[in-house]
Amino acid sequence: MDYDAADEPRLALPLPPGWRLDSAPMSPIVRAVSTGPGREDNRYQPKAVLTLENNSELVDTPEEAIDAQIVGVSRIAVVVDDIRGTTCGYSSAIVTYDTGVDNHGATCLIVAGWGSRNTLWSATLTVQGFDPHNPDYVSEKDSILSGFQFAFTGD
């Protein structure tokens, strides 16, 4: 995946079979959008959105960067689950939330770590779709979240 600054983490977004990258122009914070095969009549396709932010001026630790991202999510949705751990050796959280829209599920993986030049980066990968209990969607979501990579040059 392309990057804008030399000290940014390198991000890898897995694409399960049938998923494709969206080539539409994006804001600088959005690094990739992928869509999965449509499954529901008159419903949106499942989607994965990957963002990257420099949190150096906002917080002091990777854990605080993760907390700040979760606070942002909680402003627009109800956080249902928040599981802390590590991803690629960096602090992370998997957050499931309820958007208030019937039969719509959303889960995000937030990873934060220090780059060179004392830069604190956080990546948020959100996977969402209607019919969140559909076995194909669950399998694809799990593949995307577990296969995501966050690393700095030299890791």
Image (cartoon, rainbow, N blue to C red):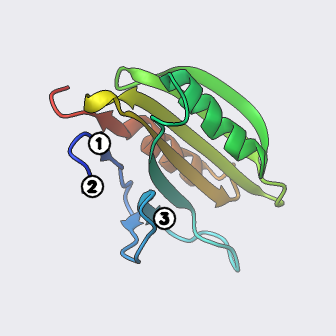
Q: Secondary structure at mark 2?
A: loop
Tell me the crowding category of disc 2: few under 14, some 14 to 19, or many 20 or more residues within 10 angstroms, Cα based.
few
Tell me the crowding category of disc 1: few under 14, some 14 to 19, or many 20 or more residues within 10 angstroms, Cα based.
many
**Quadrant (top left, top right, bottom left, bottom right) of the N terminus:** bottom left
Tell us which disc is closer to us: 1 or 3: 1
Asked if residue 95 can be seen in this view, the reply is no
**Quadrant (top left, top right, bottom left, bottom right) of the C terminus:** top left
Identify the image quadrant of residue 33.
bottom left
Q: CA distance from mark 1 to mark 3?
A: 27 Å
Q: Decide which of 37, 22 is in the foreground and name it.
A: 22
Residue receiving disc 3: 36
Q: CA distance from mark 3 to mark 2?
A: 26 Å
Circles 1 and 2: CB atoms closer than 8 Å? yes
Q: Amino acid at mark 2?
A: Asp
Residue 148 percent across, percent down from the top left? 38, 40
Residue 59 percent across, percent down from the top left? 54, 29
Q: Earlier in the sequence, mark 3 or mark 2?
A: 2
Residue 68 percent across, percent down from the top left? 63, 35
Question: Relative to 139, is 70 on the left or the right?
Answer: right
Relative to 82, does residue 72 appear above or below in the rendering?
A: below
Q: Decide which of 122, 107 is in the foreground and name it.
A: 122
Residue receiving disc 1: 8
